[in-house]
């Protein structure tokens, strides 16, 4: 009878360990799925670009999480922006963040929020590099100005198992400089 009790106890232990193992397996799958979901925005170049626009769009009373936004770029990245009709400025990642923060303060858009939306996107991926051309609109809610169109040219690289923004070139369409036909 003792042998039977020990065997019976072992059977309970064996069943308990199988249940525990199953619980651990399901938990690890859930963690893996969460990690996969958390990295979905950097697993595809278009997802990364869409995610950046989502990050710089914010409701009244909030501003972008710049520490997080920086994680979307390689540290050496550059942003070339149209600053006047005949002039562009080359900015480092930190310079671009500071320029955006200055815009938020100067235009007092923390109180109104800010929207940048992708209208259309054209993508070319070749191996571990990508080029994405984006027609977007930017808008300050509550202002009488209509949304303004702009064109961004993104250059991305895949390394360390994910996509990174290497550079952004910005242009503003005008009558003399209409938006590219490919973005119509």
Image (cartoon, helix red, strand yellow):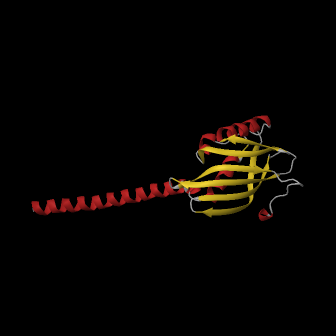
Q: In terms of depth relative to the viewer, which is nearer, 33 or 90? A: 90
What is the x, y in percent for residue 116? 74, 51
* Residue shown at 51% from the left, 57% from the top: 36
Say which of 19 and 44 sits in front: 44
> Residue 142 occupies which quadrant of the picture?
top right
Residue at the right extreme of this rendering: 175
Left or right of residue 80: residue 125: left
Residue 93 screen position, x and y as percent: 65, 41
User: Does 112 appear above or below 126?
Assistant: above
Relative depth, front residue between 4 and 118: 118
Residue at (36%, 56%) from the top-left corner? 24
Q: Position of residue 39 (x, y in %)?
A: 54, 54
Q: Position of residue 6 (x, y in %)?
A: 15, 59
Left or right side of 156 for 148:
right
Quadrant in the picture for the N terminus: bottom left
Task: Report whether residue 7 is seen.
Answer: yes
Say if 7 sits above or below 106 in the image. below
Residue 62 visible to the viewer: no
The image quarter containing residue 113 is: top right
| Residue nearer the viewer, 184 or 61 | 184
Residue, x 77% and y 64% (percent of image)? 182
Number of numbered discs present?
A: 0
In the figure, 147 relative to 103: above or below? below
The quadrant where residue 20 appears = bottom left
Quadrant where the C terminus is found in the figure: bottom right
Q: Which residue sits at x=89%, y=54%?
A: 176
Q: Is residue 93 positioned above or below 177 on the image?
A: above
């Amino acid at each position: 009878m003792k042998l039977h009790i020990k065997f019976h106890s072992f059977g309970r232990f064996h069943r308990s360990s199988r249940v525990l193992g199953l619980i651990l397996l399901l938990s690890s799958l859930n963690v893996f799925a969460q990690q996969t979901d958390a990295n979905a925005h950097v697993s595809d170049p278009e997802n990364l670009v869409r995610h950046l626009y989502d990050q710089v769009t914010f409701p009244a009373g909030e501003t972008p999480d710049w520490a997080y936004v920086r994680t979307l770029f390689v540290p050496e990245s550059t942003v070339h922006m149209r600053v006047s009709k005949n002039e562009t400025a080359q900015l480092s990642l930190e310079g671009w963040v500071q320029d955006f923060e200055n815009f938020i303060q100067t235009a007092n858009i923390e109180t109104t929020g800010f929207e940048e939306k992708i209208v259309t996107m054209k993508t070319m991926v070749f191996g571990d590099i990508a080029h994405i051309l984006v027609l977007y609109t930017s808008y300050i809610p509550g202002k009488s100005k209509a949304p303004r169109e702009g064109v961004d040219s993104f250059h991305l690289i895949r390394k360390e198992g994910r996509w990174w923004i290497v550079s952004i070139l910005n242009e503003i369409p005008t009558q003399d400089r209409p938006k590219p036909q490919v973005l119509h």
